[in-house]
Amino acid sequence: MIQVTFCSKQLFEKKKEVDVSLRLPADAEIMKRYLEAAGVRDMDDLLISDFRIHGLYAWSCGEYQEWGKADLNELNYLAARLEELFEEDQDEMYDALLCMHHPKSAADMINLSYGFDKVSYEPKIRNEQDLGEHLVKNNLFAVPEDMKSFVNYKKVGQIYLYTMNLSKDAGIMQVNENGCICDSHKEQERYGYYDGVNVPEEYMILTEEVFEDQAQQHIQS
């Protein structure tokens, strides 16, 4: 899902760098091999020159591909989350969330990959008219039965959207050509799944232990 290119900072300064490209998600054993191939000696010697989110997510995340402080463990965490969403057929809903929230970091994107039980998405509702018709016909907006054929669906959709987005407790709702998405998280709840610092251990591929193991293998050989 994510392609990361990196090299040795020391070799780069000497103009003798070997760029390697690693596909994430990966594990620590794969990471060791790629670090050795690039000649990276320790944490401070790692230089990430580029990373790109491929395929399905490229159009949504293109403007975030050049983040200045890329963290390899965090990117691995994000890649694993994207892969899981794809396998669970939740990718369209995730894309809609990206377009609505405009994440500014990998941590934001990780948080947006959680809490789908509080998210509803209907790709066929693409404007206020569609929304109003959906609400009235499914009895989600109170209208007397004998008046339903006279309802201005667009007006209903406008009122509903305004009311939803005015309430801080209701979350956020957005309707556009990509469909109708409603995220009922409150602001603090939405970004409370991952603190942006402590990457879960199962996604950690770049640690001091990786370099210690690498040095030990060199000694033995």
Image (spheres, rainbow, N blue to C red):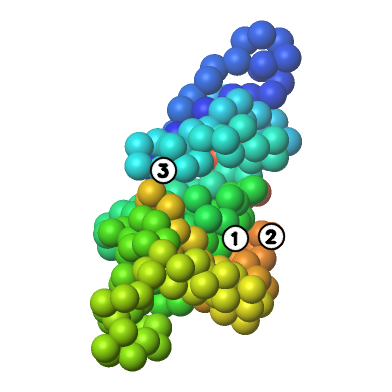
| Residue assigned mark 1 | 199
Answer above or below: position of 215 versus 188.
Answer: above
Q: Secondary structure at mark 3?
A: helix
In the rendered image, which quarter is residue 148 located in?
bottom left
Rounded to the nearest whole Å, what is the CA distance between mark 1 and mark 2? 6 Å
Compared across the picture, whether 73 is left or right of 156 comes to right
Q: Nearer the viewer, mark 3 or mark 2?
A: 3
| Marks 1 & 2, CB-CB < 8 Å contact | yes
Towards the viewer: 119 or 106: 119
- Quarter occupied by residue 130: bottom left
Q: Where is residue 205 shown, x and y percent of the image?
A: 53, 49
* Inter-mark Cα distance, 1 to 3: 22 Å
- Give the image location of residue 71, x and y in percent: 63, 44
Give left or right: position of 161 versus 130.
right
Question: Label 3 belongs to which residue?
Answer: 57
- 164 left or right of 70 in image: left
- Tell me the SS state at disc 1: loop
Q: Nearer the viewer, residue 46 or 99?
A: 99
The residue under label 2 is 197
Q: Is residue 196 above or below residue 212?
A: below
- Disc 2 on helix, strand or loop? loop
